[in-house]
């Protein structure tokens, strides 16, 4: 493959990756814990958008509240990770990447 073709492929890949990152920045995933007592909403770039805590949870001890927030965050992060894999995989599909 000549250098010109390689540079063109790199430019195409850069454009697709930039578009994928934009998509991830606008995507919202929700993590839920305690049957909805805590809901974490974040973008596909892990930016926290909203944290909702049911007032009933505040009757619990601090350890329980903390555990619920952590579980909801981890659920959201797992969903964001899956979205990142999918979106970035689509962006780079068919493009030869260095090993």
Image (spheres, helix red, strand yellow):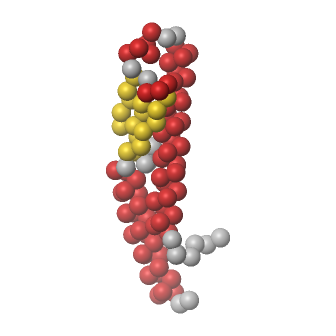
8, above or below 28, in the image: below
Residue 28, quarter of picture: top left
Residue 54 x, y percent position in the rendering: 39, 20
Residue in the picture at 52% in, 10% down? 61
Residue in the picture at 52% in, 56% down? 85
Residue in the picture at 40% in, 53% down? 24
Residue 62 x, y percent position in the rendering: 52, 13
Q: Nearer the viewer, residue 50 or 4?
A: 50
Label count reads: 0
State whether residue 8 appears in this view: yes
Seen as rendered, the residue at the extreme right is 99
Seen as rendered, the residue at the extreme bottom is 2
Residue in the picture at 52% in, 51% down? 82
State whether residue 48 appears in this view: no
Q: Nearer the viewer, residue 79 or 66?
A: 79
Quadrant showing the N terminus: bottom right
95, above or below 61, in the image: below
Residue 42 x, y percent position in the rendering: 41, 40
39, above or below 55, in the image: below
80, above or below 21, in the image: above
From the viewer's perspective, tell me whether residue 15 is left or right of residue 78.
left
Quadrant showing the C terminus: bottom right
Seen as rendered, the residue at the extreme front is 35
Residue 10 x, y percent position in the rendering: 47, 76
């Amino acid at each position: 493959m000549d250098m010109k073709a390689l540079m063109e492929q790199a430019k195409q890949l850069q454009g697709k990756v930039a578009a994928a990152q934009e998509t991830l920045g606008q995507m919202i995933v929700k993590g839920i814990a305690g049957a909805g007592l805590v809901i974490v909403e974040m973008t596909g770039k892990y930016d926290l958008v909203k944290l909702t805590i049911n007032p009933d949870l505040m009757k619990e001890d601090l350890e329980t509240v903390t555990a619920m927030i952590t579980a909801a965050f981890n659920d959201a992060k797992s969903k964001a990770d899956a979205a990142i894999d999918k979106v970035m995989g689509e962006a780079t599909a068919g493009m030869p990447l260095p090993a």
